[in-house]
Amino acid sequence: MSNDSSQTTKFPTGTLVFGLILIVVSLATLSRTFFHWSFDMPLLLIIVVAFAGVAMIISGLSAAGKHRQRDSEIPAPTDPNL
């Protein structure tokens, strides 16, 4: 097991997106209950999941771009005396 400081930790995008889905659905349900609004809940869920999918695709493309950029960089020397 190596503790390489050049290794970056991955951002938990899936967890963030899933949490945002839960927050949006719960806020929509609460607002529907408290303010007696009438809207189509299945349509709202479809829209929320579609936006979540787009957010995850953008996050994946961004991570791939960062990975490609990091691979093309020249690594730093490991000897501090150089």
Image (cartoon, rainbow, N blue to C red):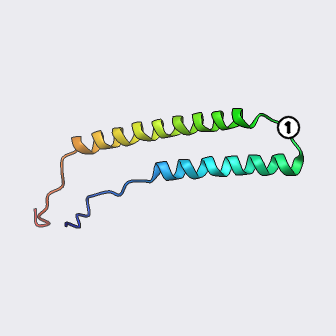
Q: What x and y, as percent, mark residue 70? A: 27, 45
Asked if 18 appears above or below 52 in the picture, the reply is: below
Residue assigned mark 1: 38
**In terms of secondary structure, where does tag 1 sit?**
loop
Q: Specify the quadrant that holds the C terminus.
A: bottom left
Q: Specify the quadrant that holds the N terminus.
A: bottom left
Q: What x and y, as percent, mark residue 53? A: 52, 36
In the image, farthest residue toward the right: 36
Q: Amino acid at mark 1?
A: Ser
Asked if 46 appears above or below 8 in the picture, the reply is: above
> Quick check: 52 left or right of 74?
right
Q: What x and y, as percent, mark residue 5? A: 26, 64
Q: Nearer the viewer, residue 32 or 75?
A: 32
Asked if 79 appears above or below 16 in the picture, the reply is: below
- For label 1, count other residues whose C-alpha is less than 10 Å away and answer few (under 14), some (14-19) or many (20+): few
- Quarter of the image for residue 68 reads top left
